């Protein structure tokens, strides 16, 4: 971590992005061979056609996180030594000690960087980006790599048809840096949580972690358990509220932003919020059909695809929105 920055207010800019997904595809047809489901049911209820899964014998969360970081470093045109902080958002780190961030910072030669992992489930990347942006703006860091990476296949019980069909593995990274122009960076951010709803989406490690009302759930310990209907209700409402709040607090309208980059949980959840707020479909990116829900990996994967496609227009704000387990939610509105 670095010491004081040049005096005066400081802005923040995104220098470059990167992402990584495994090569192996798990299609709806593969699921139909494994369990009682169909391509039609999955597509109609979720919008998902396929997702990517790691070979967990040799790969994990840190494999994807490192690849995304290396690609973002290349795109940013910096040396790894310039990073003074690496944050990885995840719920699927191989180990909690050491963190994924320590391992990948070491692997890429980011020897001047502090490193920590952050847990906020599907909201993790937006939480991490907001945290990093605030640190850069405050002069506590100058160049930060923010990564969301998930090996969701490591916490999925592939006999549970309601949960397994939703998730895939992915990672994305954004490298941000202090900028002399104070108008650049995050113009609004919001992070929230409601722990009273934790049991709607959770990964129990011990029998005692399981609340009595979920005791009959056959999903094995160490795997993700979900009350799909409860999460659906929460997500539809919260997604809309978080976007409405961000538009209201910034005074922006959907026409003013180049993109709303949202967590890819279910295309019906995205469509419901988009229709309610009357946002043009071209402004809400959807790639869930190809990757499923990759938790903290989903927002930075979308960001990287849009950034590389030139869809984040310079001079126009863009918005990031996510919600997920915890329960958590977050928004981040950026001036480019
Ligand atoms: N294939 C076929 N049938 C399935 C199925 C599958 N993969 N999964 C569940 N079903 C069945 C159920 O058993 C149920 O059968 P029944 O009526 O005989 O009991 C029926 O389909 C309807 O199930 P239901 O749970 O009501 O479906 P749904 O329309 O709520 O869709 C989800 C289920 C999981 C797709 C939906 O609830 C959802 O997307 N929830 C939010 C999940 C989410 O976003 N999580 C991450 C948040 S970050």
Image (cartoon, rainbow, N blue to C red):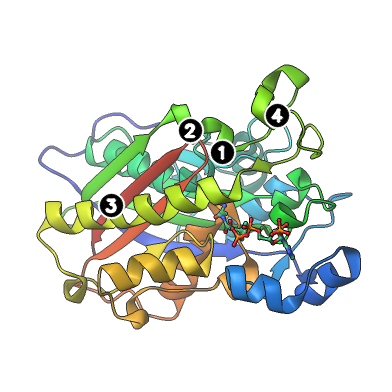
- Residue beneath disc 2: 197
Vertical placement of residue 162 versus 316, above or below: above
Q: Residue 293 in the image: x percent, y percent?
A: 60, 59
Q: Earlier in the sequence, mark 2 or mark 4?
A: 2
Q: Are marks 4 and 1 in contact (CB under 8 Å)?
A: no
Vertical placement of residue 28 versus 197, above or below: below
Q: Are marks 3 and 2 in contact (CB under 8 Å)?
A: no
Disc 2 secondary structure class: helix
- Residue beneath disc 3: 241
Asked whether the viewer can see residue 225, the reply is yes
Disc 4 and disc 3: Cα gap in Å?
Answer: 29 Å
Vertical placement of residue 12 versus 3, above or below: below
Q: Are marks 2 and 1 in contact (CB under 8 Å)?
A: yes
Q: Earlier in the sequence, mark 3 or mark 2?
A: 2
Vertical placement of residue 143 versus 34, above or below: above
- Residue beneath disc 1: 200
What is the number of the mark on residue 204? 4
Disc 3 and disc 2: Cα gap in Å?
Answer: 17 Å
Q: Quadrant of the C terminus?
A: bottom left
Q: Residue furthest top?
A: 208
Circle 4 residues within 10 Å: few <14, some 14–19, many ≥20: some
Disc 2 and disc 1: Cα gap in Å?
Answer: 6 Å
Answer left or right for 44 relative to 223: left
Front-most of 11 and 81? 11
Disc 3 and disc 1: Cα gap in Å?
Answer: 19 Å
Answer left or right for 302 relative to 152: left
Disc 3 secondary structure class: helix
Disc 2 and disc 4: Cα gap in Å?
Answer: 15 Å
């Amino acid at each position: 971590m670095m010491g004081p920055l040049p005096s005066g207010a400081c802005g923040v800019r995104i220098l470059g992005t990167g992402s990584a997904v495994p090569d192996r595809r798990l299609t709806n047809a593969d699921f139909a061979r494994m369990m009682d489901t169909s391509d039609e049911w999955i597509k109609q209820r979720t919008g998902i056609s396929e997702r990517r899964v790691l070979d967990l014998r040799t790969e994990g969360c840190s494999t994807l996180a490192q690849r995304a970081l290396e690609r973002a470093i290349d795109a940013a045109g910096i040396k790894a030594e310039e990073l003074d902080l690496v944050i990885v958002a995840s719920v699927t780190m191989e180990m909690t000690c050491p963190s994924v961030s320590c391992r990948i910072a070491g692997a890429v030669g980011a020897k001047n960087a502090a490193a920590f992992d952050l847990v906020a489930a599907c909201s993790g990347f937006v939480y991490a980006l907001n945290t990093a942006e605030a640190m850069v703006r405050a002069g506590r860091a100058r160049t930060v790599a923010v990564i969301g990476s998930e090996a969701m296949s490591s916490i999925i019980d592939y006999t549970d048809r309601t949960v397994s069909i939703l998730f895939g593995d992915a990672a994305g990274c954004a490298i941000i840096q202090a900028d002399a122009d104070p108008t650049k960076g995050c113009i609004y951010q919001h992070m929230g949580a409601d722990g009273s709803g934790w049991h709607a989406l959770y990964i129990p490690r011990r029998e005692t972690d399981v609340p009595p009302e979920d005791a009959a759930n056959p999903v094995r310990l160490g795997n993700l358990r979900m009350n799909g209907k409860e999460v659906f209700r929460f997500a539809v409402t919260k997604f809309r509220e978080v976007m409405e709040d961000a538009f209201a607090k910034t005074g922006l309208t959907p026409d003013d932003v180049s993109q709303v980059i949202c967590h890819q949980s279910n295309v019906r959840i995205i469509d419901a919020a988009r229709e309610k707020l009357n946002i043009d479909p071209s402004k809400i990116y959807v790639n869930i059909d190809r990757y499923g829900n990759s938790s903290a990996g989903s927002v930075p994967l979308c960001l990287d695809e849009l950034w590389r496609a030139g869809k984040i227009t310079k001079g126009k704000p863009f918005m990031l929105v996510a919600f997920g387990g915890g329960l958590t939610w977050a928004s981040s509105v950026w001036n480019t």
